[in-house]
Image: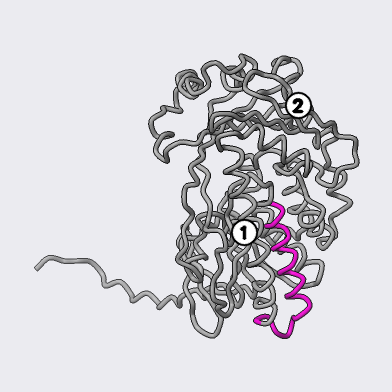
Amino acid sequence: MTDTGPTQPAQPHQPAQPVPHHPIAIIGGGLGGLTLARVLHVNDIEATVFDLEASAEVRGQGGMLDIHGESGQAALRAADLYDGFRALIHPGGEALRLVDPQGTVRLAEEDDGSGDRPEVDRGQLRGLLLDSLPADTIRWGKRATGARALGGGRHEVAFADGTTITTDLLVGADGAWSRVRPLLSDALPAYTGISFIETDLHAAATDHPACAALIGSGFFICLGDHKGFLAHHEADGSIHVYTALRTAEGWLDTIDFTDQEASKKEVLTHFDGWHEDLRALVADADEPPVPRRIHALPVGHRWDHRAGVTLLGDAAHLMSPFAGEGANLAMLDGARLGRLIADRADDTESALIAYELELFPRSEASAAESAASLELMFGDDAMAGLLDQFASQPHAAT
């Protein structure tokens, strides 16, 4: 008989760790989710934001945003951050230039400071919101993988790191591919028919003077034959370019974007005959092109109210960027939801119902406007249509 050694004493039973509970859990730390957290905070209501990124600095936040008076600015006032926002405004950012494929300027509007849609850097605006919250509000590195109802309006959220939480109020602010949305809706974003290739030109005034002169100080549009270039002159002196094409959903997959020069050449085959300064927005880019398909939820997306859960921002009403409403609506969603919760602290369900009754018609109108702008900008006679629109409604497509 083999000696197996001394008998090991039985290990004491380790009780399961309790699942952390948060009265209000906001999934997603974008502009909408942070605005909600901030409005709740200024009304002395605690909320926790769970964001998939490892930290606030892990990636860039995109380019410039024009902040609308009736939506984004109203939200920042509700968050008591309007003065901080004004300090971030990019002088000259509201300038607009419309150019045809031959490089001829068809419309030029300068920024005289009288507009109501000032431009700010998205990353700086997000930083303003982050800095306004207590340090323990944000839980980083929390990628939600799913959520389920527990009954009585309570929900459980699971994360990729294996942890879970429970909450009395779950807010899906987690963008286009929301993990919270399936609790309320079967809708999925669909490809709009437009694909972007993003490029950047750094130190434009010195390193790319011809492009800088063409773009001007603010927003730039050049469209024709169902494609074109949209660009912003950024606050740091760079130019951020969106090359846009109406094309099949799989077209981007035919290009090897790991090969910087080859991918640029492939994109530019679609712009043969366009002015060389326009082609230089891609050809002379300082970083590899970044492909992106544009998706949208159905216009008029809505859901039947369910206790203890709701959506905001792209999770609720993802739309194409061609009306400039997405970020503005996300912040307004967050501000309105936060204000209603504060006003009806003893009846959260009433607050959610009131919020959704506001949300649905507001987002439907903006989504319809965005879809119409897409058809105008990438239709058969985009230049004439845009000139007519700007003549009657300045800054209509920005």
The picture places residue 97, in percent across and down from the top left corner, at 75, 29
Check contact, mark 2 vs mark 1: CB within 8 A.
Answer: no
Q: Is residue 267 left or right of residue 397?
A: left
Q: Is residue 331 left or right of residue 313?
A: right
Cα gap from disc 2 to disc 1, whole angstroms: 33 Å
Identify the amino acid type marked 2. Gly
Which sits in the foreground, 370 or 151?
370
Residue 287's label in the rendered image is: none
Q: Is residue 132 left or right of residue 348?
A: right
Whether residue 90 is situated above or below residue 68 in the rendered picture: above
The picture places residue 4, in percent across and down from the top left corner, at 19, 66
Residue 139's label in the rendered image is: 1
Identify the amino acid type marked 1. Arg
Q: Helix, strand, or loop for circle 1?
A: strand
Which sits in the foreground, 214 or 365?
365
Which residue is located at x 82 percent, y 43 percent?
118
- Which residue has dot 2 on it? 237
Q: Is disc 2 surrounded by few (<14), some (14 to 19) or many (20+) residues within 10 Å?
A: some
Which stretch did the figure color magenta?
327-349
Labels 2 and 1: the sequence-earlier one: 1
Per the image, is 331 magenta?
A: yes
